[in-house]
Amino acid sequence: MGAGTSKTRVEWDDHATTEQSPTFATSANNTVVKSLTFVNMYNLPNNGKAKKNITQAAAAMIEGDKCAFYSVGFAGVQDTLWDKNGRHFFHRCTIQGAVDFIFGSGQSIYKNCDIQMLGETIKRKHAGYITAQSRALPDDADGFVFIDSLVHGTGKAYLGRPWGNYSRVIFCNTNLTNVVVPMELSGPRITDDVCRSWMLWKWI
């Protein structure tokens, strides 16, 4: 437990591989984290100047089961939050990035979360990607569900692109501001079956 997302920050700048780069990683079940921020500094602008070439640099990797995060910040540019495996709950969390910045095979709920697109960190006129979910088989239970959340920021971003043949992301009662490109899907592996299972829009 930290003293707040702006007061307690854990920072690192590794980027060699996705597996090696996370500032924070947990494989333990029943992990609970509250009131702090994990940052991977590698791709973030230096003195206001965006880096020419960004790469994977995760702020967190979570693969334990039944893990919960309350008022936690995750900051990076590419591959910020690796929601790798397991059942996870994120409540009032802030997740920042620009390219595939929420990705993995987690079976996760994001409730009242603040999803921030950092358009200034990538090349101008290029849209980013918020999610890259990787459900591999139609009977797999994993997927991301965003409930009562906010998607905003700078630049433009697609809601996601599939990282698996049956990727699944649901946005429910979530405020999608004009940062979102008005097209649900982007990616080379889009088929009719993928479209049916990949992205659902729902307002209640």
Image (cartoon, rainbow, N blue to C red):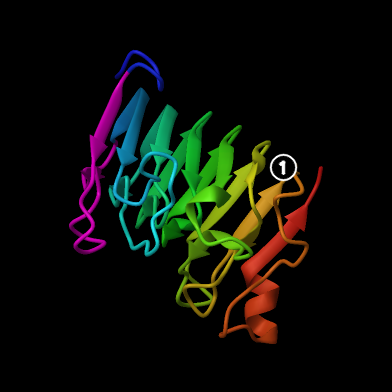
Q: Quadrant of the N terminus?
A: top left
* Above or below: residue 69 compared with residue 44: above
Q: Quadrant of the C terminus?
A: top right
Position in image of residue 32 (x %, y %): 32, 30
* Above or below: residue 190 compared with residue 30: below
Position in image of residue 201 (x %, y %): 75, 57
Circle count: 1
In the image, residue 63 lies in the stretch drawn in magenta:
no
Q: Which residue is at a point 40% across and 40% down the rendered structure image?
A: 75
How would you classify the magenta stretch by its main secondary structure? loop
Image quadrant in which you'd find residue 72: top left
Element assignment for label 1? loop
Image quadrant in which you'd find residue 147: top right
Asked if residue 23 lies left or right of residue 190, the reply is left
* Above or below: residue 33 compared with residue 2: below
**Residue farthest to the top, as pictured:** 3
Position in image of residue 123 (x %, y %): 53, 62
Asked if residue 29 lies left or right of residue 6, the reply is left
Residue at mark 1: 174
For label 1, the crowd category at 10 Å Cα-Cα, with few meaning under 14, some 14 to 19 and many 20 or more, is many
Asked if residue 11 lies left or right of residue 115, the reply is left
Q: Which residue is at a point 39% across and 16% down the rendered structure image?
A: 4
Residues in magenta, as a range = 8-30
Q: Which residue is at a point 64% across and 62% down the rendered structure image?
A: 158
In the image, residue 28 lies in the stretch drawn in magenta:
yes
Q: Which residue is at a point 54% across and 41% down the rendered structure image?
A: 110
* Above or below: residue 104 compared with residue 61: below
Q: Nearer the viewer, residue 137 or 51?
A: 51
Position in image of residue 172 (x %, y %): 71, 47
Please name the amino acid that badge 1 sits on: Thr
